[in-house]
Image (cartoon, rainbow, N blue to C red):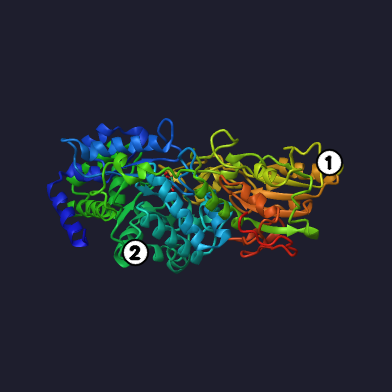
Amino acid sequence: MSEARHEAVAAAWIERMTLRQKIGQMTMAERKSVTPADVKRFALGAVLSGGGSHPAGNAPADWVGMTDAFWQAAVGDPDSPGVPILFGCDAVHGNNSVSGATIFPHNIGLGAAGDAELVAAAARVTAREMLASGVDWNFAPMLAVAQDCRWGRTYESYGGDPHRAAEFGRRFVEELQGQGIVACVKHWVGDGGTTHGIDQGETTLSWEELEATHVAPYYPALEAGVMTVMVSFNSWNGEKCHGHRFLVTDVLKARLGFDGLVVSDWDGIKYLDEDYGTAVRLSVNAGLDMFMVPERWRDFIDTLEGQVRQGHVGQDRIDDAVRRILRTKLRHGLFDLPRPAARAGARFACTGSAAHRDIARDAVRRSVVLLKNEADILPLDPAQRILVAGKSAHDLGRQCGGWTLSWQGETGNDTIEGTTVWEGIRAMAPNARLSEDGADAGPDRDDVAVVVIGETPYAEGFGDIRVGDELLVEAGSTVDGVADPIEPYARSLALADIHPEDLACIRRIAARGVPVVAVLISGRPLVVDRELAVSNAFVAGWLPGSEGRGVGEVLLGRCDFTGRLPLPWPDGRGDEPRFPAGYGLVYSRFDNAVSHDV
Ligand code: GLC
């Protein structure tokens, strides 16, 4: 269908919709707070699955059943409103809410791998597994340019380089939308540049600084035709993005020519004012088009209707928002698609397939970064007696991190399918053994130890590292005028302060005369001076996802290290980085021919 046809169809719908039906199109509710009957009655424009929110069974077919029911209510019945809904979710490192999905390294690891075509491959796999679950819209890629490792969302970024974010974001969008999933670049704008790295905090920069670091990564994705943009929780120079007319309307829409839909983040408008009517008015007039109001969506509809009827929001702004939403759905081909259960994707048997997992395992191999290799202890010889220790050695949840089956992530091996770091090493090294605390280490039975340490899963502000809560108010992280001091992940960037059990484990094994290869499973660089000092080798593993075997393949020399730091690595002694961005060692001796069938 041509653009002209799209515009004509949209105009015809706008002509015949009532005000409440138009406002319904601007409303996105969360699946647990809405029924198909509600979608029909209120003519809702979209439904989302928030992090970890999934139907019973959580198999792709269960998702198809869910999205199909919402679809049927919107367009399938005689009394349906007739406009198909978009169903969205956060598939930020694979189709990560669905059981059995292929889980890729989080973006920080893809940033370390440094290959845009690897990002494109991840997007293709993610799209196909999303199609298999009947979902249309991915709230990805995140184009944040992380400036402070204390930020809990550092791992969702490709690192600290705006050019890499731009290149990787474009390729993700091209491949995702090329496969038939609507992409959403986020969060507009400046989320990675907040003071002290506080999530949803204050980004204080000149326009020139903001543009160069945080706006520029959006340009290639916009040129590539990304269909949606999500607004950020943070503020810029004291003004929240969710109410920022200059950033949303004057820059994104007018200056950059974006004609798709701008969507709010999760209840993002409530931060604008204690009075909900004022908050709604400010955000709609700032230029937001669709509103993620997961639970209070009825209140939103009634409030916005009141604002229009009182003359605080113009009918032309409503029509512009609805036109953008309909234009996006028409461009996506949503009006021409059959119901989710009848789509080709519903028959895809690709979720967690060996082919998909192989692609993810290659990403793991290419993401890990070698920071230290004393006396060339690496690569290991598969015949060596390898002790595998550490709390993250045999833990799929820890190696996947947040946004995996649940919003905050999992621990243990009960819910995620894949291979742990231990299982990967065991499969290649017959004399390897697992001893999580390493208490029985000894040169009589172990030639070398691989000690896998690091963070436990977290997402968003729960991953922040913050020395004091007074910083929250300074950073503008308030809800209804009150600082929302959720307990941060830690009060120090030093791993030994956060997780002393890791240093203790390394020391315990080293003290028994067994050399240590430390592998850090984390969403970001951390101060690891003390762990480095007692380790013979040290590897940044990031959050590798479901294919932990890939870590072992590099340690055992099936291939060389190629990963490079995507942002500087902090030093505990001062401001100079311990390792600069771009740092990464390779094997000096590489006996094995580079084996491609690793
Ligand atoms: C969250 C995140 C956003 C995500 C949205 C839906 O709060 O900020 O990145 O897409 O809610 O889950």
Residue 377 against residue 309 in the figure, above or below: below
Residue 470 against residue 366 in the figure, above or below: above
Residue 340 placed where, x, y %? 31, 41
Residue 428 placed where, x, y %? 69, 47
Look at the numbered discs 1 and 2 and tell me whether their residues touch, using CB distance below 8 Å.
no
Q: Which residue is mark 1?
A: 445
| Residue 469 appears left or right of 520 | left
Query: In front here: 240 or 155?
Result: 155
Going by the picture, which residue comes out furthest to the top? 56
Q: Residue 596 falls in which quadrant of the image?
A: bottom right
- In 3D space, how far apart are the residues under numbered discs 1 and 2 (Cα atoms)? 64 Å
Q: Residue 149 falls in which quadrant of the image?
A: bottom right
Which numbered circle lies on residue 236?
Answer: none
Crowding near the residue tagged with mark 2, few <14, some 14–19, many ≥20 C-alpha atoms within 10 Å: some
Q: Which residue is mark 2?
A: 251
Residue 213 placed where, x, y %? 48, 65
